Amino acid sequence: MTKVLLVDDSAVMRKIIQRNIKETGMIVDEFVEAGDGKQALDKVNDNGNLDLILLDWNMPNMSGIEFVKTLRSLNLPNRIPVVMVTTEGSDAKISEAKNSGADGYLTKPFTADQLRDTLGSYLLIK
Amino acid sequence: MTTTTYDDVIEEIVSSTNEVFSTMIPMEISTDGSFYQKEDMISTDVISLVSFTGEHSGILAIFCCKDIALKITSNMLGIEATEVDQDTKDAMGEVANMIGGTLKNKIFEKFGAMHLSVPIVIAGESLSIRSATDNGKGSQNVHVSTGVTCNSQNSWLMTPFSSNGSTFNVGFVVKKND
């Protein structure tokens, strides 16, 4: 069973990502949603078997970069892959994210093909 | 604060807007030139904006009527949006966020690194906007009020986009921090 955590303060963006994942044939059995980094930490604690986290950068309460730093500091036994999905697209931001523990990076706006290409390393495709 | 001319970002505003509308919405749009408008002349139904701070401070905002906001929401979500509700505000905020983020990356060399705020969306009738600067320390306060006439001298670079006979404006104002 594949479970993906979507972290974005925009509920609309969470819906768009879900729809694109389904339409491009990637297999996800359950989506878990969080509106900021703090909520995402709670979801990680409540859902021990997450397969992937898709993470926005700019969010209220706790940003995506703060979340991924905190997540990696927990040294969880199963390392959950994190892919940033954000409007932050500079080389400096991408480096900062990867140095902080993010595994992949996708800049908004994106096409369905770009989403599939980025997530294809983490999710099965029909 | 000193006023900066920003005619040279029109191309980036157009390309950033086109990228967002062609991928995430999707919706055919066209544009034909830009103009400057005093902000006390702006009157609209929906304003969605993000602000920039850094060496320069600025705002990117979308000004549109309810019909366009509903059309954008419908296309983004694959539903038929019939009233301006939380989904509409969320969708319009995300559009401003994506255009602002894309633009920020494109104008980095001209304006330096800038931090992008989370989006703000206001919906109502005959909305106006006032972008007031503080003492030049780098932050920019944004006031959006209904029917309030303001005395700001700020002019917005407005780029109108059309879709099926309806028009919305992408506005941009920026100043270099002294």
Image: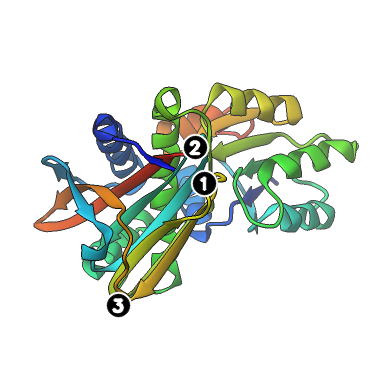
**Mark closest to the chain's N terminus, 3 or 2:** 3
Q: Nearer the N terminus, badge 1 or badge 2?
A: 1
Which residue corresponds to mark 3? Answer: B147
Q: Are marks 1 and 2 on the same chain?
A: yes
Q: Position of residue A50 (x, y in %)?
A: 75, 45
Q: Residue B90's quadrant in the figure?
A: bottom left
Q: Quadrant of residue A54?
A: top right
**What's the chain of the residue with tag 3?**
B
Residue under label 1, please give it. Answer: B136
Q: Amino acid at mark 1?
A: Gly
Q: Secondary structure at mark 2?
A: loop
Find residue A2 and report its horizontal and vertical position in percent.
68, 44
Q: Earlier in the sequence, mark 1 or mark 3?
A: 1
The mark closer to the camera, 1 or 3, is 1
Label disc, if present, on residue B74 of the rendered structure: none
Residue behind mark 2: B178
Q: Are marks 1 and 2 in contact (CB under 8 Å)?
A: yes
